[in-house]
Image (cartoon, rainbow, N blue to C red):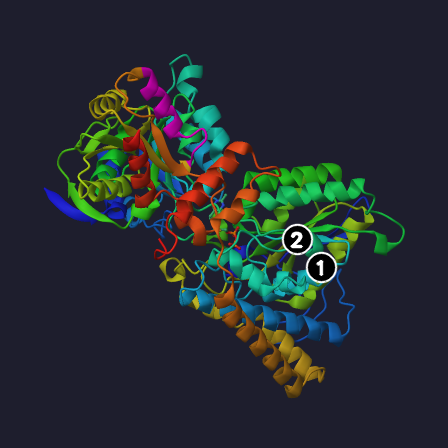
Amino acid sequence: MTERQGPDASETVVTPGGTRIVRSEEFIQLLTPEGERVEAEGFTYDHDDATIAANLRHMVLGRRFDTEATALQRKGQLGLWPPALGQEAAQVGSGAAVADLDMIFPSYREHSVALMRGIDPLDMLKTFRGTAMVDWDSVAHRFHLYSFVIGTQALHATGYAMGMQRDGVVGNPDPADNGAVLVYFGDGATSQGDVSEALVFAASYDAPVVFFVQNNQWAISEPIERQSRIPLYRRATGFGIPSVRVDGNDVLAVQAVTEWAMDRARRGEGPTFIEAFTYRMGAHTTSDDPTKYRERAEEEEWRGKDPIARVRSYLLARGAIDQAWLDALEAESEELGVRVREGCLELPEPVLEDYWELAYATLPPGLAEQRDAYLAYEAGFEGEDAR
Amino acid sequence: MSETMTMAKALNAGLRRALEADPKVVLAGEDIGQLGGVFRITEHLQRDFGPERVIDSPLAESGIVGTALGMALRGYRPVVEIQFDGFVYPAFDQIVSQVSRMRFRSMGRLGVPMVVRIPYGGAIGAIEHHSESPEAYFAHTPGLVVATPSTPLDAYWMIQQAVASDDPVVFLEPKRRYHEKGEVDLTEPPLAFDAARVVLEGTDATLISYGPMVKTCVEAALAASTEGRSLEVIDLRSVSPLDDATIRASVEKTGRAIVVHEAIRSGGIGGEIAARLQEWCFYSLEAPVLRVTGYDLPYPPSRVEKNYLPDLDRILDAVDRSMAD
Ligand SMILES: Cc1ncc(C[n+]2csc(CCOP(=O)(O)OP(=O)(O)O)c2C)c(N)n1
């Protein structure tokens, strides 16, 4: 698959603002699939082993949650689930670059980032079980609602970033006073007009927003070639937005690149476009059957680039973690699994009457009448078996 | 020649025949090629007609509809698939501002004979944006034909009629009925594209519906008949334009009308039909025209959709109210 992405040419560009942009037909990588530490021009990783271990923990927990949710769907407990198997490094690496004042706009697959932001996994299941719309406090967690319309959140993120500019939380001398927006979308989404429009706005106003594309190479059945003839990160160039491609299965590189981009945004240097080159190991959603459109060999090749395995090998080889540490993590992840499995079944059943209050800030009288008629009608069934 | 098949298979067979009949017919949409669409409506069509005629589109609805318009200007007959009802809105501008009025704004010189296929409606346990009933938006737009089959037979023929139509058609496919089987006569279309069909004859009241709700109305009529009530059921088939004559004749006969649709009540098709009926047959009406519809809320979480959607009981309740007047 990598060979279809063109030759390995790289160049370093210095923007008028003085920022160095590394362009590479390949990508920025700091940790090989074998777990060897390598260097990449223009990017350093300045965190200790404890941070890397924390990332490993988030990736393992994220995968566990995802696996449990997929299993719950298979057992008929969820209507649908979009698995994120294989994308843990892209998510955790970028999620680790987010600071207190930042805001995240996800698509519908950023389960690991959501967990890092303290979202209750059971709240995330509600949407897919059909017991609620999107039921988490996006303001408190600084993690916006999942968006199911492709690409739409790129505009919302850009507008939010423009709001941050106006609120003066960009470009302050004290870095702790600054924030930025991180927005996620897929490779397919880059074809949507909304995403192009977001890039235009972000560039035009120097909005503090980082566009983070998880290029998992497939938009349901359509390969990346159906969306773009050039490496995706280069699309941003046409909008005047600096861009970089990173090995999306390398959590160190993703964190380093995203931190760089978020720092630029917080300093007031404008938007950045990051393409995290990764792979969707499983189905698009649990309704999808990838055997209809792609080769098993491709999946096998990517299994060898597993984002979790490489960090684990790296940390074990350095002696930064040991078997006891991994056992404790396994126990924690089992605990999460149990909570997700059992909690899903206990999620409260919704009632339609609760939804009448949600369509408008003030319930219009005609709608209140509809509610009363509905309640009176349902009351007529009291004592009978559920309809 | 006739065959039993699901609506999904009937649509597939109808599209196949349209592709065979006219080399200018092209299909386009997300995932419609090798995958055959997420509902498999276009299964094997790319294999058999090639990627020039069955096109996997980039993930861009405005692009899909706008480029189809361009191809139509060039003499093609594009049939595009919108993956789910809730994803037609990025293409809404193209459909309502461009596709619908090309004939009008070109002083009649240009037509864009194209079809926008949209799986629509609820009751499949889906998440947000996957259960919408957007027909009223399109019916409100002059220049568009809005049609929806309720049976495999109609699906097979109506999709071919839609492709053959010189006007742009928004073709709504009731996805909860995709997997229901019916008899399909492959030789002769049962009705003209724009004709409503009297599904069941009756004398006490008329149930007027279309798409996914027709079957539910028939079930309600059968249930009512055990209580000695005789209900007529009309399947509109074409939501816009409406077959006024058929609706009017039925309601003048029965004196009572109930419009049933899944879509939101306010501004819905039901209101339009009620208004027409009171204009035409005020003196034959024995009771106000009633509507059984979705509520004026965004489509709710799937666990409560059974309460949101009209069902047999709500239809029978409306019949009771109509007959009580
Ligand atoms: C506007 C719109 N069109 C179509 C869909 C249906 N759909 C859901 S996900 C998807 C593929 C998205 O691919 P990509 O952007 O690459 O993201 P990924 O799912 O691979 O993370 C499609 C076509 C949608 N949700 N929204």
B12 left or right, relative to A98: left
Residue A228, image x, y percentages: 53, 47
Q: Is residue A11 placed above or below B104 in the rendered structure?
A: below
Identified by mark 1, the residue type is Val
Residue A321, image x, y percentages: 69, 83
Residue A39, image x, y percentages: 72, 68
B191 or A248, nearer to the observer: B191
Label for residue A138? Answer: 2
- Circle 1: element type: helix
For the point 25% across and 36% down, the residue is B18
A145 left or right, relative to A83: right
B44 left or right, relative to B293: left
Q: Which residue is mark 1?
A: A257
Q: Is residue A364 magenta?
A: no
A70 left or right, relative to A17: left
- Circle 2: element type: helix
Q: Indicate the quadrant where residue A29 lies.
A: bottom right
